[in-house]
Each structure stands twice: as structure tokens, then as C-alpha cells.
Image (cartoon, rainbow, N blue to C red):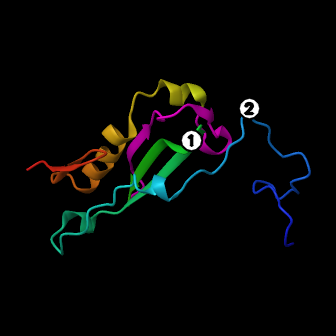
Amino acid sequence: MRGESYFSCCGADRNTPGCCVAEAHVSDTLNAEALREFTPTPPSRGEDDPRNEKVYAMDCEMVYGVWGPELARVSVVDMDNKLVLDLIVKPHNRVIDYNTRFSGLTANQVEASTIDLFEVCFASFLFLVIPDQFKVSRHKTVSSN
């Protein structure tokens, strides 16, 4: 009903105890400024583009840091459901909730990772998609030819 609020996880009224207990409150702080950090996939170069014959599915697991959601794992499978990339990523900020209930990741797994998102994961994914054309970092795209 209008004006009433509910917990999104279980649908319970906000005046009742929640269905979960955590050490910290998690909020959604994603905003337009944060979206400027995203780098689009390069456009197709036409019919001869080798990416036209490749199909991948990507799944990302998120944890909640002090500044909002952060990537903690990226997995990619090809069109034959073969795992081609599975990396646990070290979040940039202090994690307040590992979201283990949904992500399956534990604090030990995430904290043990030394993989940085922009140095390895994104570059690795685009390396799979565009094997010999580009190397990608957080702020630039460099031709490897």
C-alpha cells in the first residue's frame, strides 16, 4: 500500500524485526558519479570481427564495502558452458558484509585474494573477447599490435 515500506529481502513490514542480522547496515550508494568508472566494450569492427563468433556469459558476485557494493568474484563461461575465467577479486574498500548467503564467498576467500579488478579481471575478460587486439587498464586502452 502507498506509504508503507517493507524489507526487500522478505517482504516484512519495516516495523518488525528483520529476517537477517548483520554487524553493519548495508545501503545502496550507487549513483551517477560511480557509473563514470565503467568502461564500455569496444564496438564491433564489422563482419570479420573475431568476437562475432564468440558467446560468453558472465556472473559477478558482490560484497558490500563501506562505500557500497563491490565486485568480489567474476566468472565467465563460454557457449559450451566451459568455465573460461573464475577470479576472486580484492575489493578496494573495507568490506562490511561478505554477502555469503548469496555470493557463497567467505571472508577468508576474499581477504586472501591479491587480484585487483582493474589490473587483472577486466583486462582478462577483454583479452578473452578480443584476444590479440587490446590490453585494457582502468584509464586507458592500448593496442598490443
87 vs 61, left or right, is: left
70 part of magenta stretch: no
Tell me the amino acid under the disc marked 2.
Glu
Position of the N terminus, as image quadrant, is: bottom right
Q: Nearer the viewer, residue 19 or 30?
A: 30
12 vs 40, left or right, is: right
Of the image marks 1 and 2, the number of the one nearer the N terminus: 2
Circle 2 sits on which residue? 23
Q: Quadrant of residue 25?
A: top right
Vertical order, 142 against 92 (above or below): below
99 part of magenta stretch: yes
For marks 1 and 2, give the CA distance. 16 Å
Residue farthest toward the left in the current orientation of the protein: 145
Circle 1 sits on which residue? 67
Q: Which residue is rendered at x = 41% and y = 53% of the image?
A: 77
Tell me the amino acid under the disc marked 1.
Trp
